[in-house]
Image: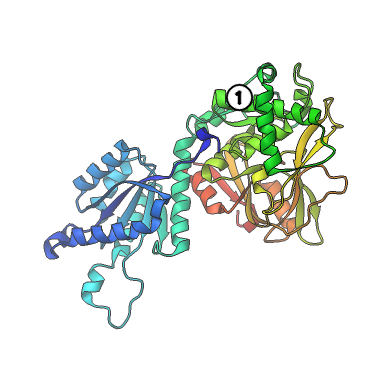
Amino acid sequence: MLPHLENRRPRIAVLGTHLALYREAYAGYTETMGAYINAELAHLGDAVETVAVEVTATVDEAAAFIARAEELKADALVLISAGYTNSLSVTPPLRGSKLPLVILNTQEARTVTARFRFDDLMYNHGMQGVQDITAVLVREDRPFFIVTGKLADGDTCAHLLDYLSACRARADLRGRRIAWLTPPQWGMGDGLVEPGQLGAAFGLEAFAVPCEELAARATEVSQGEIDKARLFDEEHFAIAETVSREDHDRSLRLEVALRKLVEQYQLAGLTFSFDHIARAPGIDTIPFLGITKLMGEGLAYGGEGDLLATAWTAIAHCLGPPVSFTELYTMDFSDNTALCTHMAELNWRLARRGEKPTLLSRTFSLAPCQPFCSLRFTLEPGPVLLSALTLDGSGAFRVITLDAAVTDFPLLTDTWERPNYKVRFPRDIREVMDDYARAGGPHHLCIAPGVTARRYRAFAELCGLCWWPVSTGTA
């Protein structure tokens, strides 16, 4: 992973609450509930950084804790009602805070049996407080997320971490930088976006880096740097016998030059259009190999100069890597799948386990350039999330998600010189494609294995955006 793109852990402050009368009626109640909350949080392990934990019972105590959480730059405030909480002991400072709020509706007891005592009840009725609090928050239009269950259960823990990861991503996006080397491909309208819109909505900085800078960096690349990059390829890829040293060096030189630009500008994403970059003075081929390898280190990318896809893939990386730019190419009505591929660009870290990607040397019919090297591979079968960012008729951003699964389909190799794989949707592909079109889905997407749409929905809600879950058919 590029050092500047390593995702940190979500930073949380945990506020336990209960009715102030319990302190008087039950000696040690606050301390007992504090010990329980800490034991529950232990199930999160190293997945989060907990900056503060406190159990409060008055509005002043809650206000002081929330102010402290803001000073400590928590990504989210996690609220646990430990026993009944009267809402007005906590909702006034919640209303005044901009911290994302995640309510964990939990208790110590897993079950209620015939041996359940009144004393057990007094330490296991926090859900009443949650209901009091959330009713008021809804009246006051104060957003919140809620997770019900015990963190010892994997699905509950994953649910909470999805929300916390979205909160952390929202915070970390501010100041991340993406750049374009060329204008977008002529006539391609679905990826057009004003850079200022990305800054206003997400805090992303988008700017142009002239191709002349890439060409200048390429002239500075030493043979030693090229040889080091080649050693990486020899270790991780199966290099075809037809690959000449000249073609390989040509692509490696541009890869090293791209890397220097990424490091110089601390880029989270980069895009270019093959038809423009192939004609840029001082650039003798298309840097497909470099962009494919840099995606494997966390760099976001959008094909054909697609700034919108680049921005969204950078966001998806913050939500949970690894991710990749991708594209749906051909429908297979017989088995409800779609073939996915592109010119050459796909994050090679998503390749099927146990099979090295093949490094090939290719000529290109769509733009004038010298031969370049690229990788051919298929993806690891299993659940994935396809997603895209688009704009609606009012100019507002919309997040679209499609649940899918990479199928166990063999790599296409007959005349194929590019990565390729198939995905299957949970319902009829005809309906999915119809609904994707109605949602305004663009032809460039992001793919992420092992991430749920819930995390993307949470991010959309944090940013005040519409979330459109195409594959469920519920939008």
Residue at 77%, 34% in the rendered image? 373
Q: Nearer the viewer, residue 405 or 322?
A: 322
Query: Which residue is tagged 1?
Result: 260
Would you place residue 437 above or below residue 405 in this image?
above
Q: Is residue 14 rendered to the left or right of residue 437? A: left
Residue 114, image quadrant: bottom left
Q: Nearer the viewer, residue 206 or 130?
A: 206
Q: Secondary structure at mark 1?
A: helix
Residue at image location 15% in from the left, 60% down from the top: 23
Q: Residue at x 33, y 77 (%)?
A: 112
- Position of residue 334 measured from the top left corner of the image (x, y, whole percent): 82, 61
Quadrant of the drawing holding the N terminus: top right
**Picture residue at 55% right of the left edge, 35% below the top:** 2
In the picture, measured across the screen, residue 117 lies left or right of residue 435, that is: left
Q: Residue 417, relative to residue 412: is it above or below?
A: above
Q: Quadrant of residue 302?
A: top right
